[in-house]
Image (tube, helix red, strand yellow):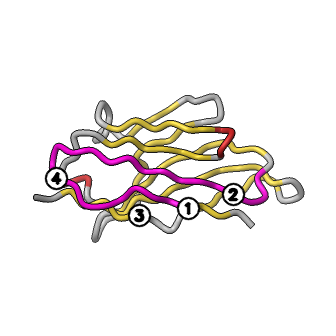
Amino acid sequence: QVQLVESGGGLVQPGGSLRLSCVASGSIFSMNIMGWYRQAPGKERDMVARITGDSSTNYADSVKGRFTISRDNAKNTVYLQMNRLKPEDTAVYYCYIYYYSIGRGYLERWGQGTLVTVSQ
């Protein structure tokens, strides 16, 4: 069983910063893609940022230059540094992993979500 534990969400003023963390544990032989998605009220879940095993990254256009994704492979942890936050960044942020488990093959897992609210 693989579990994801997210942390770092909260309330921040426009222009502020937050850092999200997601720690994966369990039957993970190798970690492939790690990423963050978000879902605002009444909207679909969209990709925010993803990072591959060789640290290649891609970002949604709306966060380029403001958000930075990184990972610590030794700790199976992915981070999302969010700077110059805007009210439109308000959403539930979900951690996502795509990994290989011996005997089960490639699988994916979502975190439970952490709320980020950007408001005065």
Question: Residue beneath label 1, please?
Answer: 5
CA neighbours of label 4 inside 10 A, class few (<14), some (14 to 19), many (20+): some
Q: Residue 109, percent across and down? A: 62, 61
Contact, mark 2 vs mark 1 (Cβ under 8 Å): yes
Q: Residue 25, percent across and down? A: 69, 57
**Which amino acid, by three-letter code, is at mark 2?**
Ser
Instruction: Specify which label sits upstream in the sequence, 3 or 4.
Output: 4
Contact, mark 4 vs mark 1 (Cβ under 8 Å): no
Q: Residue at x 26, y 53 (%)?
A: 89
Q: Secondary structure at mark 1?
A: strand
User: Which label was assigned to residue 25?
Assistant: 2
Please tell me in which quadrant of the rendered image residue 43 appears. bottom left
CA neighbours of label 3 inside 10 A, class few (<14), some (14 to 19), many (20+): many
Instruction: Specify which label sits upstream in the sequence, 2 or 3.
Output: 2
Question: Residue beneath label 3, please?
Answer: 114
**Which amino acid, by three-letter code, is at mark 4?**
Gln
Please tell me in which quadrant of the rendered image residue 84 appears. top left
Rounded to the nearest whole Å, what is the CA distance between mark 2 and mark 1?
9 Å
Q: Secondary structure at mark 3?
A: strand
Placement of 50 over or under 103, stated as above or below: above
Q: Which contiguous range is marked in magenta?
A: 5-28
Seen as rendered, the residue at the extreme left is: 120
Question: Residue beneath label 4, please?
Answer: 13
User: Which label was assigned to residue 47?
Assistant: none
Which quadrant holds the C terminus? bottom left
